[in-house]
Image (cartoon, grey):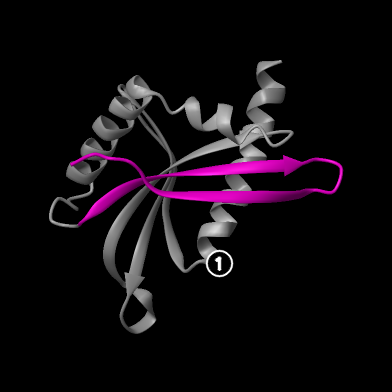
Amino acid sequence: MATEKRQFGDIGEEFAANFLKQKGYKILDRNWTQKCGEIDIVAAKVSGLFKQKIDEIVFVEVKSIKNNDAFLAAQNVHYFKQRRLIKTAQIYLSYKKYLNLPWRIDVLLIDFNPVTNTAKIEHLENAVWAK
């Protein structure tokens, strides 16, 4: 069961990463883990020639769902999960020396249909207020 759930989550994260790339984000890391928690996707809003200047760091929590259950999935990003995301994000910023950059935490809800291999994606920007 855990393996099936993990595979389902991996599919959702792949849809999420592709969605973010299509929106112009640069993927910096995936499944970045520390003792206090994990960040599913670390992305950057970029600008400049060749999109090399990082303007903002975006930490993304991905929630893969079935059967339009977005409400329940969003509720899984509860207070304690938010605290872990914030702490892990702060460690990431320090570790990568991005302390002077603006940052935010988004949630992506991926409603995956395995029959059609398609997904509806809801992007909740700044879903976790961290400042």
Under mark 1, the amino acid is Gln
Instruction: From the top left corner, tell me how far across and down residue 123 is, in percent.
Output: 50, 51
- Residue at 24%, 30% (x, y): give it: 87
Q: Residue furthest left?
A: 100
Secondary structure beneath dot 1 equals helix
Q: Which residue range is magenta in the image?
A: 102-131
- Residue at 56%, 49% (x, y): give it: 122
Q: Please give the count of numbered marks on the rendered protein.
A: 1
Q: Which of 96 and 82 is in front in this view?
A: 82
Q: Residue furthest top?
A: 1
Instruction: From the top left corner, tell me how far across and down residue 21 is, in percent.
Output: 52, 63
Vertically, is 83 above or below 97? above
- The majority secondary structure of the magenta stretch comes to strand
Q: Residue furthest front?
A: 71
- Residue at 56%, 42% (x, y): give it: 109
Instruction: From the top left corner, tell me how far across and down residue 71 is, in percent.
Output: 57, 32
Location of residue 102 by image quarter? bottom left
Q: Where the N terminus falls, by quadrant?
A: top right
Location of residue 83 by image quarter? top left
Q: Residue furthest bottom?
A: 49
**Residue ID for mark 1:** 22
- Is residue 3 located in the magenta-colored stretch of the structure? no
- Is residue 108 located in the magenta-colored stretch of the structure? yes
